[in-house]
Image (tube, helix red, strand yellow):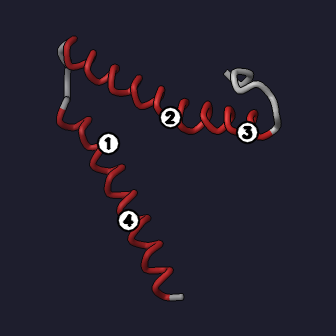
């Protein structure tokens, strides 16, 4: 039981640390950023959101439609 609590604490601590490091990048880019850097950040954010929507929403919906006997294009 204590080992489970330890693993949960390590996982929570790691998640907290990565969130803090990611949000601390705001301190590195104070002031005005160049249009090229903004374009890179927006492209990265768009890629993350597309991947999240495909892997977490669309693929499971297609699999569920196939399981129910519906056409797999229906969720899309």
Which is more foreground, mark 4 or mark 3? 3
Q: CA distance from mark 1 to mark 4?
A: 15 Å
Q: Name the residue beneath numbered marker 1.
A: 23
State left or right for residue 49 relative to residue 13: right
Tell me, yes or no, whether the two marked residues, 1 and 3, touch with CB atoms within 8 Å. no
User: In the figure, residue 42 lies in which quadrant?
Assistant: top left
Tell me which label, 2 or 4, sits earlier in the chain. Answer: 4
Whether residues under marks 2 and 4 lie with C-beta atoms below 8 angstroms apart, the answer is no
Residue at the spot x=39%, y=26% of the render?
47
Q: Exactly how many numbered labels are in the figure? A: 4
* Disc 4 from disc 3: Cα separation: 34 Å
Foreground tag (1 vs 4): 4
Q: Would you say the residues marked 3 and 2 are in contact, meaning their CB atoms lie under 8 Å apart?
A: no
Q: Are marks 4 and 3 in contact (CB under 8 Å)?
A: no
Label 3, label 2: how many angstroms apart (C-alpha)?
A: 18 Å
Query: Which secondary structure lies at badge 4?
Result: helix
Task: Quadrant for the N terminus, please.
Answer: bottom right
Q: Earlier in the sequence, mark 1 or mark 2?
A: 1
């Amino acid at each position: 039981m204590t080992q489970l609590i330890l693993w949960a604490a390590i996982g929570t601590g790691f998640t907290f640390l990565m969130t803090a490091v990611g949000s601390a990048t705001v301190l590195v880019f104070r002031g005005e950023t160049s249009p090229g850097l903004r374009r890179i950040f927006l492209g990265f954010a768009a890629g993350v959101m597309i991947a999240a929507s495909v892997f977490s929403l669309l693929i499971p919906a297609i699999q569920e439609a196939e399981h129910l006997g519906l056409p797999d294009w229906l969720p899309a």
